[in-house]
């Protein structure tokens, strides 16, 4: 490989990749696994933003909200 190799990214192509249905599936599977690890009452959504796909994992039920408040469940799950 040459020492002076330069790579120029195609911004539109990278944006399209980060917003693609394939990326939505990858992020959805990750979010689903983490929501399941957190336990009952936790759920997720996958959304496409201006430049990339992202997921929100949150406590949906009152019991899950209480659990997250008392134990920082989502933080522990995401960091694991």
Image: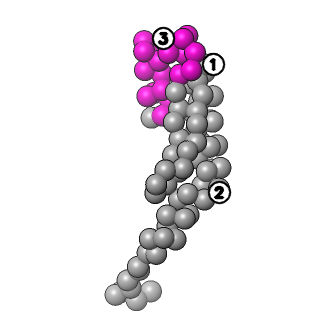
- Is residue 61 shown left or right of residue 6? right
Mark 3, Cα crowd under 10 Å, few <14 / some 14-19 / many 20+, is few
As drawn, the label of residue 76 is: none
Q: Is residue 66 magenta?
A: yes
Q: Is residue 41 above or below residue 6?
A: above
The image shows residue 30 at horizontal and vertical percentages of 59, 42
- Residue nearer the viewer, 23 or 80: 23
Q: Which of disc 3 and disc 1 is earlier in sequence?
A: 1
The image shows residue 52 at horizontal and vertical percentages of 49, 54
The residue tagged 3 is 66
Q: Which of disc 2 and disc 1 is earlier in sequence?
A: 2
- The residue range painted magenta reads 59-78
Q: Which of disc 3 and disc 2 is earlier in sequence?
A: 2
Residue 61's image quarter? top right
The residue tagged 2 is 22
Q: Are marks 1 and 3 in contact (CB under 8 Å)?
A: no
Q: Are marks 1 and 2 in contact (CB under 8 Å)?
A: no
Looking at the image, which residue is at 65% across and 57% down? 22
Secondary element under disc 3, as helix, strand or loop, is helix
Residue 4's image quarter? bottom left
Report the predominant secondary structure element of the magenta stretch: helix
């Amino acid at each position: 490989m040459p020492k002076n190799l330069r790579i120029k990214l195609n911004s539109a192509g990278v944006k399209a990749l980060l917003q693609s249905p394939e990326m939505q599936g990858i992020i959805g599977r990750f979010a689903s696994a983490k929501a399941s690890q957190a336990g009952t009452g936790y759920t997720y959504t996958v959304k496409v933003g201006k430049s990339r796909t992202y997921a929100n994992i949150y406590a949906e039920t009152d019991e899950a909200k209480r659990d997250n408040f008392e134990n920082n469940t989502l933080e522990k799950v995401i960091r694991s």
